Image (cartoon, rainbow, N blue to C red):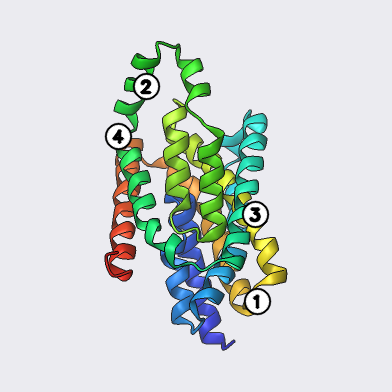
Amino acid sequence: MAAESALLLAAAGFAAGLAGSIAGLASLVSYPALLAAGLPPLAANVTNTVAMFSTAVGTAAGSREELRGQRRRLGRLALLAALGGSVGAALLLGTPSSTFERVVPWLIASGSVLILARNPLRRLAARRSGMADGAVRRGLLPAGAVLLVGLYGGYFGAAAGVLMLAVLSLSHTEPLPVTNAVKNIATGAANVTAAVAYAFLAPVDWGAAAALGLGCLGGSWMGPVVVRRLPETPLRIAIALAGLGLAVSLWRAGGGS
């Protein structure tokens, strides 16, 4: 790989790591950068997944303050997401992608709307269930939702963080930086599991993955610091609107099908 391409991918990786750790939209930056570097779509997809391994490392290092006391919860979520990621990787390697990719924009749009409507949905669920807040949190985090988001993350991954943030936001009343940090670990588990499979079974461009991953490490380390300092409501709205924008972009790229 030419030095110029490597530098551009490293810069794109930094932006992707920042976007991913803040909003779950790393692939909005990294995937087009890999395509621009000349990689075909499948190679770009699997190379992107491998490079995102460093995002999980960076966000974990940058979110130690938010992750205190979350060990048991993280273990449960990471296990579910990793299982989903392994299934997603198997699907990518063994099935045509066209059908699933038609659903992707709708999944991202749904997750974005859930983030926007988080507080009213929490109140509605609490009223209808007649349960205390702690019981609501336990009841509204279905393992199946985390598993499915992990599957999506292993298969394609664009805005998987938006979907995971939607699931976690509806089930826990906690500061957004904490939910965001937990989201990063859960989606990282799905990503790492898929990356291991792709490293052995898919056409990964290792030079591109190294350059992109190095930038992702720096950007994802900085992301939690940014989230910690931004007001919650505007940040949540910005994440949701960015997710909706990506959904529209993918829908148009797919011919509106």
Local crowd at mark 2 within 10 Å, few (<14), some, or many (≥20)? some
Q: Looking at the image, can residue 157 be seen?
A: yes
Q: Residues within 10 Å of mark 3 (few under 14, many from 20)?
A: many
- Residue at image mark 3: 86
Type of residue at label 1? Trp
| The disc label shown at residue 117, or none | 4
Question: Who comes first in sequence, dot 2 or dot 4?
Answer: 4
Q: Residue at x 56, y 48 (%)?
A: 150
Give whichever of 27, 229 is nearer the camera.
Answer: 27
Q: Secondary structure at mark 2?
A: helix
Q: Residue at x 31, y 36 (%)?
A: 233
Identify residue type, mark 3: Ser
The quadrant in which the N terminus is found is bottom right
User: Which residue is labeled 1 in the image?
Assistant: 206
> Where is residue 101 drawn, in percent x and y?
42, 63
Q: Nearer the viewer, mark 4 or mark 1?
A: 4
Would you call the spot at circle 4 few (<14 residues within 10 Å), some (14-19), or many (20 or more)?
some
Mark 2 to mark 4 CA distance (whole Å): 12 Å
In the rendering, at what x and y percent does residue 244 appear? 30, 53
Residue visible at 29% across and 26% down in the picture: 120
